[in-house]
Image (cartoon, rainbow, N blue to C red):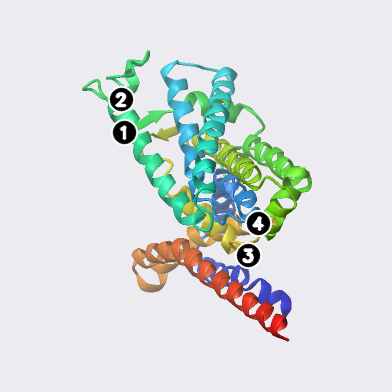
């Protein structure tokens, strides 16, 4: 019973997924291929949330800044007409550089908003998106003069909304390719995810991971012990932003195109929903929550529209359920965590009065 109580969300989502799969009429091979595709596109985004949660900052919705860093790097690479392995080297290098700089700025703001980090991170993500869109919609062609004029709109101001990123996708496709159900896939993104998972696994057990747990458990005690909490929180946010940037590179490489203005939107919500579906909370998150959550969340995300169409002859029912799943899980998880925190405070108070 304790196991069921502690994992009520993933168990509930699993049951819904099985029901939706049954009524969707999809084959298991098709569902597996789709889940694999979404797994490689979203896994690092979800892993990016672990360290901020560990150090007590809740869900970092500002990971969208990492996605923006990667998209900027890709546009710069297309502007320079880079090809071959060098385009990937350039994109990764610039993405890491930008995500470290932007991540440090995000951390600076979040450290000044203690206790309200999640709300502030949402606002930071929205503001960053507006600034980013303004740069590429207005500054490119006026203040910034690209070398590759083909990336601009016909009027000569602003970058095109969709750009071909085949230079990046071709590099991905050449490394560890395989076929499934007649479609071409690559294991290269899985290799990248494995490497970054090992890095995160190491960081959690290294000094920074221990300090993050101390800061997240009790900030006042951590400060009393001489731990530089702001520095620890900043490092966690920077690492989170870098992970998000790498995930966006994988996503663009898998698509083969880049949606310049909207390609980064919604990724923070899906990542947050996935990790919560996997059994995490805004106070505690583990790597297994990410892997379980991404698979369950996207399996239900894929099957629900077809199940809704077959059951009610209306595919929009499934689409509504998608929206409820993405946003509802986040709201429910926050309410459950607040309730749990309140009960814990009441328990401590009762023990103190005794």
Q: Residues within 10 Å of mark 1 (few under 14, many from 20)?
A: some
| Mark nearer the viewer, 4 or 1 | 4
Q: Earlier in the sequence, mark 3 or mark 2?
A: 2
Q: Residues within 10 Å of mark 4 (few under 14, many from 20)?
A: some
Dot 4 falls on a residue whose secondary structure is helix
Give the quadrant of the N terminus.
bottom right
Asked if labels 1 and 3 touch by Cβ distance under 8 angstroms, the answer is no
Q: In this view of the protein, which residue sits in the foreground, 67 or 16? A: 67
Q: Can you tell which mark lies on residue 139?
A: 2
Q: Earlier in the sequence, mark 2 or mark 4?
A: 2
| Mark nearer the viewer, 3 or 2 | 2
Mark 2–mark 4 Cα distance, whole angstroms, equals 42 Å
Mark 2–mark 1 Cα distance, whole angstroms, equals 7 Å
Give the residue number, with chain letter if any, for mark 1.
Answer: 134
Total marks placed? 4
Q: In the rendered image, which quarter is residue 130 located in? A: top left
Give the quadrant of the C terminus.
bottom right
Give the residue number, with chain letter if any, for mark 3.
Answer: 279
Q: Can you tell which mark lies on residue 219?
A: 4
Q: Earlier in the sequence, mark 2 or mark 1?
A: 1
Asked if labels 1 and 2 touch by Cβ distance under 8 angstroms, the answer is yes
Using the image, determine if residue 130 lies above or below residue 20: above
């Amino acid at each position: 019973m304790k196991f069921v109580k502690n994992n009520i969300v993933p168990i509930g989502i699993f049951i819904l997924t099985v029901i939706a799969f049954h009524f969707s009429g999809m084959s298991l091979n098709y569902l597996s291929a789709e889940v694999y595709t979404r797994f490689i596109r979203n896994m690092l985004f979800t892993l990016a949330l672990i360290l901020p949660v560990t150090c007590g900052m809740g869900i970092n919705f500002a990971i969208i800044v990492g996605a923006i860093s990667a998209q900027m790097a890709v546009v710069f690479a297309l502007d320079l007409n880079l090809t071959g392995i060098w385009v990937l080297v350039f994109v990764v290098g610039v993405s890491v550089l930008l995500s470290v700089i932007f991540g440090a700025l995000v951390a600076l703001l979040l450290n000044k908003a203690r206790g309200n980090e999640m709300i502030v991170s949402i606002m930071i993500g929205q503001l960053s998106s507006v600034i980013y869109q303004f740069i590429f919609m207005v500054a490119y062609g006026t203040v910034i003069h690209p070398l590759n004029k083909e990336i601009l709109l016909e009027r000569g101001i602003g970058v095109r909304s969709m750009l071909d990123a085949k230079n990046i996708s071709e590099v991905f496709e050449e490394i560890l390719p395989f076929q499934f159900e007649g479609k071409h896939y690559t294991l290269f993104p899985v290799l990248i995810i494995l490497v970054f998972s090992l890095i995160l696994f190491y960081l959690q057990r290294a000094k920074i991971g221990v300090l993050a747990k101390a800061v997240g458990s009790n900030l006042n005690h951590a400060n009393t012990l001489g731990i530089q909490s702001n520095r620890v929180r900043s490092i966690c946010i920077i690492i989170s932003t870098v992970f998000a940037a790498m995930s966006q590179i994988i996503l663009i490489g898998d698509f083969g195109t880049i949606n310049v203005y909207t390609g980064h939107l919604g990724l923070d919500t899906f990542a947050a929903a996935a990790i919560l579906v996997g059994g995490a909370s805004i106070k505690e998150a583990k790597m297994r929550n990410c892997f379980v959550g991404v698979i369950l969340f996207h399996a239900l995300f894929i099957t629900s529209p077809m199940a809704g169409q077959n059951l009610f002859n209306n595919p929009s029912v499934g689409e509504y359920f998608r929206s409820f799943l993405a946003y509802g899980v986040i709201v429910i998880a926050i309410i459950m965590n607040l309730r749990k925190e309140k009960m814990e405070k009441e328990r401590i108070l009762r023990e103190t009065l005794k």
